């Protein structure tokens, strides 16, 4: 290990040359995606980025602060609808998106208030109820397009019309980077430490001067902000949103991304969001996968039902979550760390 | 000499149970004051009342001449009180360093709005972090924690966990420090070190220390004064030699 | 009118009560809030359907077979999955049950598709009984009676049998129970089985009302869970009261104020109640001692 000259090196983002090199390479690869992949695959990359943004926030709440939320779909919905509605008549896209993030954060703050006194299943139910309520209210009010949903207007940033998935990709990548760096700074800062302290022992945290009430609600608001931003972009990626996009299933899916990726780490958030999103999309079209596809088709015809085959997606999703918790509680991040240690100590 | 901590007729009831009954005491600045008593005498309850985890049923608590009765734990911490816990309340999924840095929480200024300035070395948030990191390093040096700086506290041996908790309380630079059974579970060697450190801490920091302890040898060797409790009531308060010879104390301890 | 509405509420409340009872039984014995409870019930109901429709077995055989299946499924969930969790904290356990829920949901969807089926049971939905001036269908009456019967059985089981005593001992202090020779793991597994059976009964009672499809138990589960939380998860009597309160309030709200927002009102009440009583209406709150 090289000699450290200042404590700053412990908190800096890019610690040493290898890290700097890898980060640069990673960024380059991400930047090249629209050149290499087909339009539909870029669309999928956009979905992945959106989920990464949402999970970055949710992981701070679940992984760092130790709170449960089964209602994050609600914040995503608030962000999506607010962005579209503001963008339609009042503001340009970026201010709409940011404002929508703050509106989601305010709802997060409000939801955080009952959470102060609730734990475990009680908190799960309260947040679940919130998520359901948001979807139902949106579905019943014609202002939000009701059950039919709404379409976002033409995306325009600083006078440039963004028409293709690739354009949207670069915008989303930029936002994801900024939010990722911010989340990382937060975790390493006084605020992130206070979050983790509340998770490990709220009593000790309070006796050291952490205002538990303020930090718990702050954590809810923070994660809701990320969910809101993610939702806002999601609306434009999909090109159409309706209440059906924001069911409790979405909240469960988001929570499983956090767990599968690994609690409380940025790398975990990125891995979890990526893997689960891809798995989820591929699972819906399992027939198209070589080898496995025909096998499952055969199984379906003989033992199950062919019309129900897309449901196999849920089977995989459920199994993945169960297996991860049974065998690797640190999630994909844990596996990643093991691979890293293996190569560091190779050939021993 | 001025009073660092004063309890005025503090009573705490849990339903029908009276855990501490009408306790009054004044602890002078710079004193090491011990509380002894058999199990269930109300010692930890008293600490919890002082640090705000319990709301007192009657009476009042004063810290450095200011009333803190009924205040929240974090507000009391802000006024200069810090404590350790009987059964360790470390942040177990955080490293020693992070635990100690949390002790500096009160003094740090980083917030959401200046967080991005942590990116460059001269940014206010980065400077804030570095400044307090230096303070924490001093405590690490004082308590010989260098070797476990980046270990998760749940992986440390029990004795070392107790030291980390002491360090965390010290990092908050309290004017009054409450130690709840600091020697419980330590071996002989660690106990000797603890006496040494407590004396050191008093010498280096301008601090008042309250200790709950069962180990009589340790109590008499460090304390300026001792209060003995039994069944929630204060039996006697005074110099160590006098208290341990007091007939009621002898009776309470020997049955 | 109001009597009729209350009756409707009690019918819905009976279903919620069964789900809530099942959930709080497992929660009490193992601190697992089992989100898979609903899908386990749905799956068991499908098993009854298969025995009835495909194998043409008599109803009572199918009913018994379905309950047996439910019991085994409960044992499986605990023995093969929950007990093997490496780091069994509240969050992980909750997510495991969510995973199992999604898994069963997918499996049922794969096997039986999402088309709606009809479960034939020997109680009529259309023929009504008049009772104290109120009109109630045979099925609804049966629902209420079966629910009450099951609640009484659970009460008797916990109160008067050796197994019940062992369950209660395990709930209160697992270590002490183990030291005193109670096979706590087996006991917890059995409570999972019993809960699953209670859920399956709810499923079979539900199926004729809502038609049988993989989504059938999602709402009852949420409501039952909400009812359990409303009543206070750790008090069985409280849980049942919570379920009836929820059913009745929902029914009245739906008629007098708005059917559209009927399902949110449940959660609104719960959030408000929990804000003032964090452990529900009848639950006891424990604070951690330091």
Image: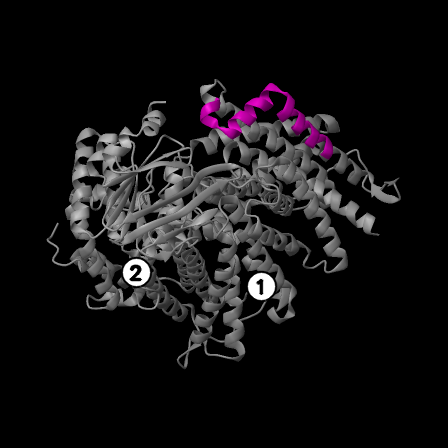
Q: Nearer the viewer, residue B226 or B156?
A: B226
Residue A92 is situated, as x and y percent measured from the top left of the image, at 46, 78
Look at the numbered disc 1 and give the secondary structure of its residue. loop
Asked if the stretch drawn in magenta spans residue C151, the answer is yes
Q: Is residue C267 left or right of residue A72?
A: right
Asked if the stretch drawn in magenta spans residue B58, the answer is no
| Image mark for residue A267 | none
Tell me the chain of label 2.
A
- Please say if B195 is above or below C184: below
Residue B137 is situated, as x and y percent measured from the top left of the image, at 17, 52
Q: Nearer the viewer, residue B243 or A26?
A: B243
Circle 2 crowding by C-alpha within 10 Å: few under 14, some 14–19, many from 20: many
Q: Nearer the viewer, residue B78 or B115?
A: B78
Q: Are both tags, 2 and 1, on one chain? A: yes
How was this image coloured?
one colour
Report the magenta residues as a range.
C148-177
Q: Which residue is mark 1?
A: A242
Q: Residue at x 73, y 60 (%)?
A: C257
Query: Which image quarter: residue A169?
Result: bottom left
Magenta part, dominant SS: helix
* Residue extending farthest top: C181
Tell me how far mark 2 sits from mark 1, CA to CA. Answer: 35 Å
Q: Residue at x 36, y 30 (%)?
A: B38
- Please say if C276 is above or below A41: above
Q: Residue at x 31, y 58 (%)?
A: B106
Query: Which image quarter: residue C158?
Result: top right
Q: Is residue A195 left or right of residue C185?
A: left
Q: Nearer the viewer, residue C59 or B38?
A: B38
| Image mark for residue A185 | 2
């Amino acid at each position: 290990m090289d000699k450290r000259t200042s404590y700053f090196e412990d908190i800096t983002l890019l610690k040493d040359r290898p890290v700097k090199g890898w980060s640069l390479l990673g960024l380059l690869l991400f930047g090249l995606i629209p050149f290499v992949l087909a339009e539909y695959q870029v669309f999928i990359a956009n979905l992945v980025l959106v989920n990464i943004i949402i999970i970055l926030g949710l992981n701070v709440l679940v992984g760092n602060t130790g709170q449960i939320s089964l209602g994050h779909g609600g914040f995503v919905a608030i962000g999506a609808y607010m962005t579209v509605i503001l963008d339609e008549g009042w503001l340009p896209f970026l201010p709409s998106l940011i404002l929508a993030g703050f509106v989601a954060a305010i709802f997060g703050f409000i939801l955080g208030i009952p959470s102060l006194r609730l734990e475990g299943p009680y908190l799960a139910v309260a947040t679940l109820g919130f998520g359901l309520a948001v979807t139902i209210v949106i579905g019943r009010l014609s202002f939000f397009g009701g059950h039919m949903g709404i379409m976002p207007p033409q995306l325009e940033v600083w006078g440039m019309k963004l028409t293709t998935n690739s354009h949207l990709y670069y915008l989303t990548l930029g936002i994801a980077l900024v939010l990722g760096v911010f989340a990382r700074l937060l975790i390493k800062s006084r605020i992130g430490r206070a979050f983790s302290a509340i998770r490990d022992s709220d009593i000790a945290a309070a006796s050291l001067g952490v205002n538990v009430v303020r930090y718990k609600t702050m954590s809810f608001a923070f994660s809701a902000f990320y969910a809101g931003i993610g939702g806002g972009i999601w609306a434009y990626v999909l090109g159409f949103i309706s209440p059906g996009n924001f069911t409790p299933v979405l909240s469960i899916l988001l929570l499983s991304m956090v767990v599968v990726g690994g609690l409380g780490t940025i790398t975990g958030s990125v891995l979890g969001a990526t893997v689960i999103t891809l798995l989820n999309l591929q699972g819906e079209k399992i027939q198209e996968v070589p080898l496995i596809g025909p096998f499952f088709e055969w199984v379906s015809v003989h033992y199950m039902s062919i019309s129900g085959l897309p449901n196999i997606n849920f089977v995989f999703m459920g199994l993945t979550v169960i297996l991860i918790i049974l065998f690797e509680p640190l999630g994909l991040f844990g596996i990643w760390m093991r691979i890293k240690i293996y190569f560091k100590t190779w050939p021993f | 000499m001025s009073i660092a901590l004063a309890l005025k007729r503090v009573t705490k009831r849990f339903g029908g149970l009276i855990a501490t009954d009408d306790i009054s005491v004044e602890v002078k600045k710079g004193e090491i004051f011990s509380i002894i008593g058999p199990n269930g005498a109300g010692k930890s309850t008293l600490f919890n009342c002082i640090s705000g985890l319990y709301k007192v049923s009657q009476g009042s608590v004063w810290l450095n001449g200011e009333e803190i009765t009924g205040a929240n734990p974090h507000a009391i911490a802000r006024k200069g009180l810090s404590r350790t816990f009987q059964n360790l309340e470390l942040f177990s999924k955080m490293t020693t360093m992070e635990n100690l840095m949390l002790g500096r929480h009160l003094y740090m200024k980083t917030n959401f709005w200046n967080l991005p300035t942590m990116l460059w070395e001269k940014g206010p948030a980065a400077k804030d972090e570095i400044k307090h990191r230096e303070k924490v390093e001093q405590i690490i040096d004082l308590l010989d924690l260098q070797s476990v700086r980046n270990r998760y506290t749940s992986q440390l041996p029990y004795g070392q966990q107790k030291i980390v908790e002491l360090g965390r309380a010290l990092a908050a630079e309290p004017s009054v420090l409450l130690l709840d059974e600091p020697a419980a579970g330590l071996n002989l060697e660690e106990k000797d070190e603890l006496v040494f450190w407590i004396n050191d801490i008093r010498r280096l920091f301008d601090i008042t220390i309250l200790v709950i302890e069962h180990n009589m040898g340790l109590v008499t060797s460090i304390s300026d004064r001792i209060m003995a409790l039994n069944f929630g009531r204060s039996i006697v308060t005074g110099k160590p030699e006098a208290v341990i010879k007091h007939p009621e104390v002898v009776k309470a301890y020997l049955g | 009118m109001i009597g009729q509405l209350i009756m409707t509420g009690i019918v819905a409340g009976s279903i919620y009560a069964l789900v809530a009872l099942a959930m709080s039984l497992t929660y009490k014995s193992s601190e697992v809030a089992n989100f898979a409870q609903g899908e386990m019930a749905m799956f068991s109901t499908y098993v009854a359907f298969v025995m009835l429709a495909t194998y043409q077995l008599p109803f009572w055989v199918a009913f018994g077979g379905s309950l047996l299946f439910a019991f085994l499924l409960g044992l499986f969930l605990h023995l093969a999955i929950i007990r093997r969790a490496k780091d069994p904290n509240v969050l992980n356990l909750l997510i495991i049950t969510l995973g199992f829920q999604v898994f069963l949901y997918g499996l049922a969807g794969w096997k039986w598709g999402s088309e709606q089926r009809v479960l034939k049971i020997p109680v009529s939905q259309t023929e009504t009984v008049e009772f104290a001036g109120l009109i109630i269908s045979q099925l609804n009456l049966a629902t209420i009676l079966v629910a009450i019967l099951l609640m009484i059985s659970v009460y008797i089981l916990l109160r008067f049998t050796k197994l019940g005593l062992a369950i209660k001992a395990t709930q209160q202090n697992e270590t002490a129970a183990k030291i005193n020779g109670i096979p706590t793991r087996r006991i917890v597994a059995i409570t999972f089985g019993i809960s699953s059976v209670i859920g399956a009964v709810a499923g079979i009672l539900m199926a004729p009302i809502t038609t049988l499809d993989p989504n059938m138990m999602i709402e009852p589960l949420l409501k039952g869970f909400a009812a359990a939380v409303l009543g206070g998860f750790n008090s069985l009597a409280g849980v049942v009261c919570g379920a009836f309160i929820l059913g009745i309030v929902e029914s009245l709200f739906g008629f007098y104020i708005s059917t559209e927002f009927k399902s949110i009102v449940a959660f609104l009440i719960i959030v408000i109640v929990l804000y003032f009583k964090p452990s529900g209406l009848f639950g006891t709150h424990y604070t951690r001692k330091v």
